[in-house]
Image (tube, helix red, strand yellow):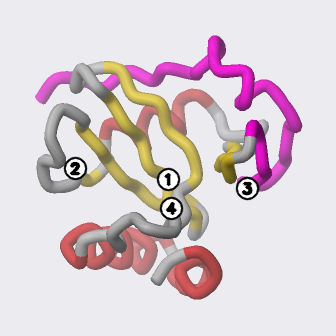
Amino acid sequence: MTRRTYDPGERRSKHKTPLTERPAFVVKQGALVGLCPTGLPDDVRDELLNAAVEAPATGRRTIVYNVHQGVVYMAESSNGRTFHGYPWRQRPGRPALPQLIRDALRQRAIASGCEPELNALMKEFGR
């Protein structure tokens, strides 16, 4: 498998501020944006990206998911190599996470001891 590379989105102004210690969702340019925590080490980020579960094909984009400390992270790519990731939340008008993805994330959360945190996130931001 080709190793996935993280694209920090430095050219995306909505990702510049505010800096957060915990994953957060803020309104930027009229959209609710997921912000990664400032303390997420690069090696953990890269491991999460490369061990992520790939969603079923949705056209030209590749979408992958993983869970860390109860937070679901989603990363997208238009070329299948470089990905931009952020905390996931269900968006109005978009389909729910596929059951295959939910099941895989739940198993990972159980294995890493963060299932209660995942349950709380899904109750607040999932469906």
* Badge 4 vs badge 2, beta-carbon distance below 8 Å: no
Q: Secondary structure at mark 3?
A: strand
Q: Provide residue 30's location: percent of width, then percent of height.
A: 73, 45
Disc nearest the viewer among 2 and 3: 3
Give the main secondary structure of the magenta stretch: loop
Q: Are marks 1 and 4 in contact (CB under 8 Å)?
A: yes
Q: Which residue is mark 1?
A: 73
| Amino acid at the residue labelled 2 | Glu
Residue ID at (75%, 55%) = 24
Report the Cα–Cα distance between label 4 and label 2: 13 Å
- In the displayed structure, 62 sits above or below 87; it is above
**Range drawn in magenta:** 1-29
Which residue in the protein does label 3 denote? Answer: 25
Q: Which residue is mark 4?
A: 72
- Closer to the N terminus: mark 2 or mark 1? 2
Instruction: Assess disc 2: are there few (<14), some (14-19) or many (≥20) residues with their C-alpha within 10 Å of its C-alpha.
Output: some
Q: Helix, strand, or loop for circle 4?
A: strand
Mark 4 vs 2, N-terminal side:
2
Disc number placed over residue 20 in the picture, else none: none
